[in-house]
Image: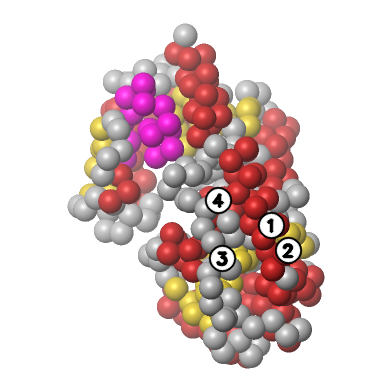
Amino acid sequence: MALAQGIPQVSYLWFRRWPGLDETVWDLPGRSVPLLSRDGVPRLPVRVQAAAAGCALTRRCDLVHAVMTIGSSFPLFSRLWDRLVGDTPVLHTVPGVMNPALLARSRPLGPTVALSEVTAAEMRTAGFDQVRVIRPVVRLDEWPLRPRPSTDRPTVLVTGHHDAGGGAEEAIASAAVAARAGARFRLVLALRDRPGQDTRTLEENLRAQAARQGLADTEVLGSGSDMHALLASADVLLYVPRALGGKADVPLTVLQALATGRPVVLSELPQFESLRGTVLTAAPGDCERTGRLLRQVLDRPRCWQDLARRGRVTVEERFGVAQFAAQYSSLYEELLA
């Protein structure tokens, strides 16, 4: 979406869910290619459709831009790639890597874009010889700066996936530390599921953990939550995974929170280096320190205001549309020359 909106001189073909059309893509430039999907989740039948349609469409395009995480099936897919697309030039943007060990068994699809320097370095070490770093983008007009909610009981928003080590359990434990230290807040977990997960059981387990920790004012939401509304009503974003596990090197929810003017407490992962000095960080799994940081930002208005200001400035300077579009436009010109 960011590419289609930011580089209007390019005519894009892009996949969309069918039946139904997400309202966020109603006005997206270019031409959509429908894929039959019940809920928009990229399960195997959807991926097969994308591969089949892609094989046909690539031969009618001047350039293929694959925005694709490197997961367990990527090594085999990368070895079949040349047979699928022929001589069409390819640019591959890698939002994340499920496991760095997969890189040694993978082949580059073409010049590669990573979202962070740490992932770029891992890819170069594995033999990806044309790797650049282009940071993700946040449209500031869609995520305006908002004042802090004026409520007696602040809201702490937790985002992520229902993954082992994905941060949900760590967030609850950290919130309990802050609550025992005297902080008073409402905890909201807005988590996405993955294909094959028993989401209902996972959500019940999180509610039970919160109850055991004495966090009575806790709500667990599903993946269809309105992030604009959640961030507008939140005071702090808490995102503390032990490992990213294929999630984007710089999660968009984190950038959206910073753009909105919401302080963020993060795990100290190397992929978040570009946010240093903007967010509060603790070592992965260090719930004691994370809880103390959470209490600090909730109970000190001056700290809250300083972090909110720095977050917005960081997004404006490092993750804006102009720089993002210029870097990708330059890459397109090189590949099409």
The crowd level at tag 1 (other Cα within 10 Å; few <14, some 14-19, many 20+) is many
Mark 2 belongs to which amino acid? Answer: Cys
State the separation of the CA atoms marked 2 and 4: 17 Å
Relative to 168, say whether 312 is above or below: above
Quick check: marks 2 and 1 in contact, CB under 8 Å? yes
Q: Is label 4 in a helix, a strand or a loop?
A: helix
- The type of colouring in the image is secondary structure
State the separation of the CA atoms marked 1 and 3: 12 Å
Mark 1 belongs to which amino acid? Answer: Leu
Return the residue at label 3.
Answer: 148
Q: Which residues are magenta?
A: 1-15
Which mark is nearer the camera, 2 or 4?
Answer: 2
Return the residue at label 2.
Answer: 303
Return the residue at label 4.
Answer: 259
> Position of 144 compared to 169: left or right?
left
Return the residue at label 1.
Answer: 307
Mark 3 belongs to which amino acid? Answer: Arg
Along the viewing direction, whichever of 25 and 20 lies nearer the viewer: 25
The structure residue drawn at horizontal position 75% and vertical position 50%, both measured from the top left corner, is 277
